[in-house]
Image (spheres, rainbow, N blue to C red):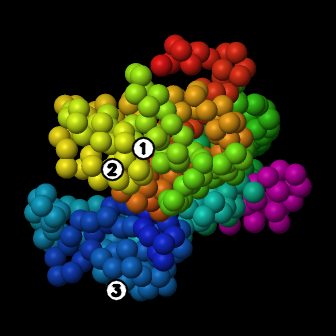
Amino acid sequence: MIGRRITHRMADGVRVPGTWRHAFIRNGDYFLTDLFIYADGLVDCWGLVTLEEFEEKLRRGWVATELPEGARASGHELAAWKFSEPRTWHTPELLLAEVRDTVDQLNGRPDSTDRCLDAVDAFLADRTEEKRAVARAAYLAIPRTQRHYALGDMDRKDWPLQVLVAGPGGHMDSRPDGDEAPVTQEEYDEAVDYFEDRAQWIAKSSSRVPADGPVTSVAPAIQLYDSYPLKPSDDPDTRALRNNYPAPVDVDGVTYPSVAHAYWALSTADPGVRAAIAAADTAFAARNLAVGARRCDGWEQARTAVMTRLMRAKYAQHPALARVLLATDDATIVYDDGDSRFWGDNAGRGRNWTGRLLELVRSELHAERAGIGPTTTARN
């Protein structure tokens, strides 16, 4: 299960999503490490391998699922110990099945649990023993460690699922109390009722509109690439959303040629450098003047607030540019900045703060248009 363990690697400039889990590598001794699993089917277990190669490493015990009594183990820069009465939850086959499920999940494909629930739906729609057998086989194909989570019900766990695929008189994969008695008709009817109630809940849940609108963007993402030189235009495109676009902004009575000029000027405590930055021919020249100057105290903590104020000023003072920003609707804005991984996305390696603040200012402009947000004066 992926949970919050989200990572990625770059391959030929493409971001490949991934996740990780703990594992032991046996290289003489046993080493506790992270096993990285990626959407393209590669697994990093002290080196990238395909799923077929990973299966071979499991078979040979390089990725260990058996931990012998007294074996030495360590966690890098953490601890070293010997195993005493070790218990493990996995076999090579089970761990491989979990990894294959993870690859499906990373790609948004149905995993073994999804395939089982689809087979259960097919059985409930046409309750033949043949379709029950298919559903039971699909249930047993879920890695044993994951079966409890199949229904997403931590009170009942997978009990209704086991009962349904076993059928009246059949035997469950396991009973919580260890009882091996066959499934009774009463238990079976209860499981059927459970699934019918569950289907109604899912139908209502899927048709429910979120109270405050959709979770994901409706409009396609927009990438604002580095672009030089930028010149003013009577009909600007999204390049006008870049901070170095020549759109003068007035800040406290001082006019700067662009947001970038104003940002770099305000970053320095030297009045002389500020004046030189304001007069610089290009945003690039403004940055170079600021690089060697002393930063204002607390600049790193204040810079996002300063940039937000400057963006608000730009779009308040240039209605045509505000219309360009509004025309992006609710698109994710990906901003490249060759100088900064803080301000730019930079092929997934940066924090994209400029893009995020553009989305914030855009939302404020939409709110003002609708008469439901703070006024420009109040925000400045």
Residue 339 or 105: which is nearer the viewer? 339
Quarter location, residue 139: bottom right
Q: Which residue is drawn at the image coordinates 27% and 49% (left, top)? A: 289
Q: Are marks 1 and 2 in contact (CB under 8 Å)?
A: yes
Q: Dot 2: few (<14), some (14–19), or many (≥20) neighbours within 10 Å?
A: some
Horizontal and vertical percent for residue 142? 58, 62
The boundaries of the magenta stretch are: 119-137
Q: Main secondary structure of the magenta part?
A: helix
Left or right of residue 380: residue 206: right
Write down the residue under mark 1.
260
Q: Which mark is residue 60?
A: 3
Q: Are marks 1 and 3 in contact (CB under 8 Å)?
A: no
At mark 2, the secondary structure is helix
**Which mark is first along the chain, 2 or 1?**
1
User: Above or below — where is 228 with respect to 252?
Assistant: below
Q: Which mark is residue 277?
A: none
Left or right of residue 304: residue 139: right
Q: Which mark is residue 287?
A: 2
Quarter location, residue 329: top right
Residue 157 or 52: which is nearer the viewer? 52
Answer yes or no: is residue 175 visible. Answer: no
Q: Are marks 3 and 2 in contact (CB under 8 Å)?
A: no
Q: Which residue is drawn at the image coordinates 39% and 37% (left, top)? A: 262
Q: Which residue is drawn at the image coordinates 42% and 68% (left, top)? A: 9
Distance Cα–Cα, label 1 vs label 3: 58 Å
Amino acid under disc 1: Ala
Q: Dot 1: few (<14), some (14–19), or many (≥20) neighbours within 10 Å?
A: many
Closer to the observer: label 3 or label 2? 2
Horizontal and vertical percent for residue 365? 63, 27
Amino acid under disc 2: Arg
User: Above or below — where is 332 with respect to 215?
Assistant: below
